[in-house]
Amino acid sequence: MSRTKVVPIPVMGRHNINAYLLLGRRPVIVDAGTPGSGRKIHDRIAAHGVDPTDVSLIVITHGHIDHFGSAAELHRLTGAPVAGHAADLGPYRSGRAREPYLPTGLMGRIMARNKNLHVRTEPFEPDVLVTGETDLEDFGIAARIMPTPGHTAGSVSVLTDRGDLVAGDLVANSLFGLVRGRPANPPFHDDPLHNLASLREMLALNPARLHVGHGTPLEPDRVRRWAEREHQRLSRREARR
């Protein structure tokens, strides 16, 4: 089994919304961007010298519209099965993110008013229903799907043999990816404490780098320091309740 390489596929802006191409014996896509971006992802994969019909799997990290919006379209364009966690089946089957969005700060409160977050996209039924840690060797890459609930109940990450963690919205770059290399919460979390616990569990596995849905890759040591501050902040907030 060849070692897995992680290639970012920008969907919006340079790094504002990312999908990822994982290259091993066969290619795997992680996330499907916003509605209507399937062709863009398809063409950018082809530009990397990969035949999109060779894609063995499309992994959706969670049920927010900027991550599963083009899953059905990308499935048609590549013929690849789609994997998603059972706990986010509601959004996948309805084509709508579960609402209300729960902001983590000012950016989330502003973005929650954006009508594009509340649109309906084409629904899909996962071909591979994830309920726990899932080895991807049969799909041609040395990697595992790791449940990382908290951002949504069905959030997952993908951990490769090289220690690259494709983390979805487990953590982000600040200001929706605009401030590179600075860890921050994404605009929304269903359960911030649960998400932080999932993040700390992944950091305990000593990943080499975290590849996120919004922004450039993050260094683990910097994320650890941020996570410790975030733990203290959330603990103080809970104590005041």
Image: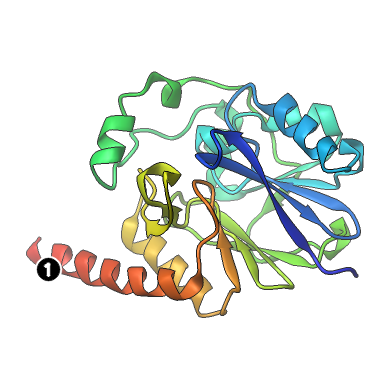
Quadrant (top left, top right, bottom left, bottom right) of the C terminus:
bottom left
Of 145 and 222, the residue lying toward us: 222
Residue type at mark 1 is Ala
In the rendered image, the vertical position of residue 131 relative to residue 119, given as above or below: below
Quadrant (top left, top right, bottom left, bottom right) of the N terminus:
bottom right
Instruction: Give coordinates of residue 52: x percent, y percent.
Output: 86, 37
In the rendered image, the vertical position of residue 61 relative to residue 73, given as above or below: below
Applied colour scheme: rainbow
Q: What is the number of callouts on the image?
A: 1
Q: Which residue is label 1 attached to?
A: 239
Residue at 49 percent across and 72 percent down: it is 220
Residue at 34 percent across and 36 percent down: it is 101
Residue 140, by quadrant, is bottom right
Residue at 83 percent across and 39 percent down: it is 80
In the figure, is residue 59 to the left or right of 121? right
Instruction: Give coordinates of residue 123: x percent, y percent.
Output: 63, 26
Residue at 66 percent across and 73 percent down: it is 163
In the figure, is residue 131 to the left or right of 57? left
Q: Secondary structure at mark 1?
A: helix
Instruction: Give coordinates of residue 127: x percent, y percent.
Output: 76, 42
Q: Local crowd at mark 1 within 10 Å, few (<14), some, or many (≥20)? A: few
Of 145 and 130, the residue lying toward us: 145
Instruction: Give coordinates of residue 119: x percent, y percent.
Output: 48, 20
